[in-house]
Amino acid sequence: KYIGGGVLNAGCVQEEIRFVLCPELLVSLLFMECMDMNESILIRGSKRFSNYKGYASSFQWAGHYEDQTNTEVIKINGIEYERILTDVVAIDALYYEDKMTQFKKECILREIVKSYSGFTACMKSNDPEIIATGNWGCEMAYYTFNNNETSNKLFQLIEILQKDYNTIDRIYNEIVNFSSLISNGKIKDQSILNYFKR
């Protein structure tokens, strides 16, 4: 719910890494309130200054980064500024102790609203945006951080969805149905991949 995650504490995963690579993002910790269920935060124009290697406990600074991202000129109070064309969107995901809770209809709707809020905030044109993410996204580069099992399952699921469930409403309805079957004890296998494979 709070932007920056654990960047000023012990955290060092996706959000925290982004904040240390682009230290201008740290200013948002002073001004951004806790996000509500239908809110996201958009930060436009943050520059990357550092390279890195590793992730979490293996994270290390790997030298200076020369950000070659395109820029635009904006005018504020009659003064022109050059701003880098990078958007960082913060949308918080919920943590579920019981992973099956995330498939309940109200939880899915919350995630859809949150995703819509965040991803539409950064749309600059009719061109599709590329979203670099871990567990969020639309047209995206999804990073599994060398987890081969997750990569393989994701590719299997994408193949199935593209072949047999080619609309968002079909996918949504199947996820809601999956949740209902689990809740009513009609299926025991709690793998959504296996559900879609049937």
Image (tube, grey):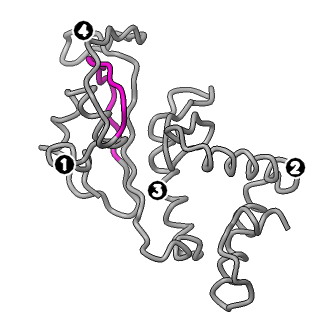
| Chain-order first, disc 4 or disc 2 | 4
Magenta span covers which residues?
41-55
Viewer-nearest residue: 43 or 147: 147
Q: What amino acid type is highlighted by mark number 3?
A: Lys
Q: Secondary structure at mark 4?
A: strand
From the image, tell me which residue sits under label 1: 10
Q: Position of residue 87 (x, y in %)?
A: 39, 29
Residue 68 disc label:
none
Q: What amino acid type is highlighted by mark number 1?
A: Ala
Query: Residue at point 25% right, 11% down?
Result: 81
Query: Residue at point 33% right, 45% down?
Result: 41
Q: Is the residue marked by circle 1 packed among few (<14), some (14-19), or many (20+) residues within 10 Å? A: few
Q: Is the residue marked by circle 3 packed among few (<14), some (14-19), or many (20+) residues within 10 Å? A: many
Q: Does residue 35 appear to the left or right of 29 in the view shown?
A: right
Foreground tag (2 vs 1): 1
Report the Cα–Cα distance between label 2 and label 1. Answer: 42 Å
Q: Specify the quadrant of the image occupied by residue 71.
A: top left
Q: Quadrant of the N terminus?
A: bottom left
Foreground tag (4 vs 3): 3
Residue 163 disc label:
2
Report the Cα–Cα distance between label 3 and label 2. Answer: 27 Å
Up/down of 192 relative to 41, above or below: below
Report the Cα–Cα distance between label 4 and label 3. Answer: 33 Å
Q: What amino acid type is highlighted by mark number 4?
A: Glu
Q: Position of residue 172 (x, y in %)?
A: 70, 64
Q: Position of residue 179 (x, y in %)?
A: 65, 78
Residue 80 disc label:
4
Up/down of 58 relative to 170, above or below: above
Query: Residue at point 20% right, 27% down?
Result: 24
